Image (tube, rainbow, N blue to C red):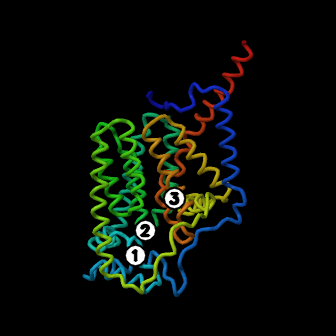
Amino acid sequence: MLKGVFQTRFEGWSRGPALALIATLLVLLAASNWSASTSPAPKVRTSEAQHSDLQLYRDIITRVRGGENYYRATAAELRKGNYPLKPFFTFRLPTHATIYAALGEQVMVVLFWLLSAALMIAWWIRLRACLPKLLLAASLILIAGGLGGLLQPQTGLFHESWAALLLALMIAVYRPERIWPAVLAGAAALMIRELALPMILAMAGLALIEKRWKEAATWAAVILLFAIYIALHAQWVAQVVVPDDPASPGWSGLLGLQFALKSIARVTMGIRLPVAIASILLFLSLFGWASVRAGWALRTAILLAGYGTMVALFARTDTFYWALIAAPLSFVGLVFVPKAFADLAKAVRRQSHQGASA
């Protein structure tokens, strides 16, 4: 790949497929804003009876730092805040709280910002060979916009925030010939928040498809270790839950595409834009990522589409912060859109010219 140049998937296309894709994109853009004003909006627990999730996590960390067992502390705080305790994954994995309790929230805020800076550097290194300087600068600004909601000091209390940074870093540092940095970043995300599992499965699946057997085995080992961890977690949760504890209402909200777009907008720079504009930009960004003929772009498109779909299908209005996982890279794909559109336009003109010459 030449410096300042990247290939799109539309080079060499004929007119028919190009027009079909353009029509599909227009339909999706329209669907993303159809009755957007009446679709559900994200909300947080803020009443006296329902403490915020951020306060819940902070209170758990405080008790663990005081020497209390994580599972007993979590059970007590969940009951205090009228949260469900069943099934076992209503309890977050202990990794996050244990590290916060050991290092303190102020240290963790600094580490979070340093990780954010490392993420931007990693993507600058990744993109500098394929983007001209102007678009490279724009990509860094868009990453900063995606990180905007995460860089508030309290946001690191959300487990999804750390998973978001680590998964985005995983893709940036991934190299088929040297997979260990990506594996370590992905494994860390998984051990903090189990919602990272679909992306780790995707990494393993792509390794299999591309016949990189050693890499696939490495990802499988990570998944196996996580399976052991989650099994122990379930066992430890069972020791502190009693029959009368409430169960979760479930994770089948089916709140739809517009809710997912609103959620991503709320945790990024999109919060400052009209909903319709933010939704269009998010869709175009995903299109931009999917357009680039490169493994890192494909993996990013899978991340954004996958977690957007997860929020649309399974999140409730009070768990909108799952969208944090897609936040860092959610707008960056816009830098690839002009060339993607240019190549689609060439495809349309190519067929027309061929027909005229015939």
101 lies left or right of 262: left
Q: Quadrant of the C terminus?
A: top right
Mark pair 2, 1: CA separation: 8 Å
Mark 1 — residue? 57
Q: Earlier in the sequence, mark 1 or mark 3?
A: 1
Residue visible at 49% across and 41% down? 136
Which label is found at residue 121?
none
Residue visible at 70% across and 18% down? 353
Q: Residues within 10 Å of mark 1 (few under 14, many from 20)?
A: some
Determine the residue located farthest toward the front in the rendered image.
243
Callout 3 secondary element:
helix
For residue 157, above or below residue 270: below
Which label is found at residue 158?
2
* Near-viewer residue (319 or 97): 319
Q: Position of residue 108 (x, y in %)?
A: 34, 67
Mark 3 — residue? 310
Dots 1 and 3: beta carbons under 8 Å? no
Q: Earlier in the sequence, mark 3 or mark 2?
A: 2
* Near-viewer residue (271 or 220): 220
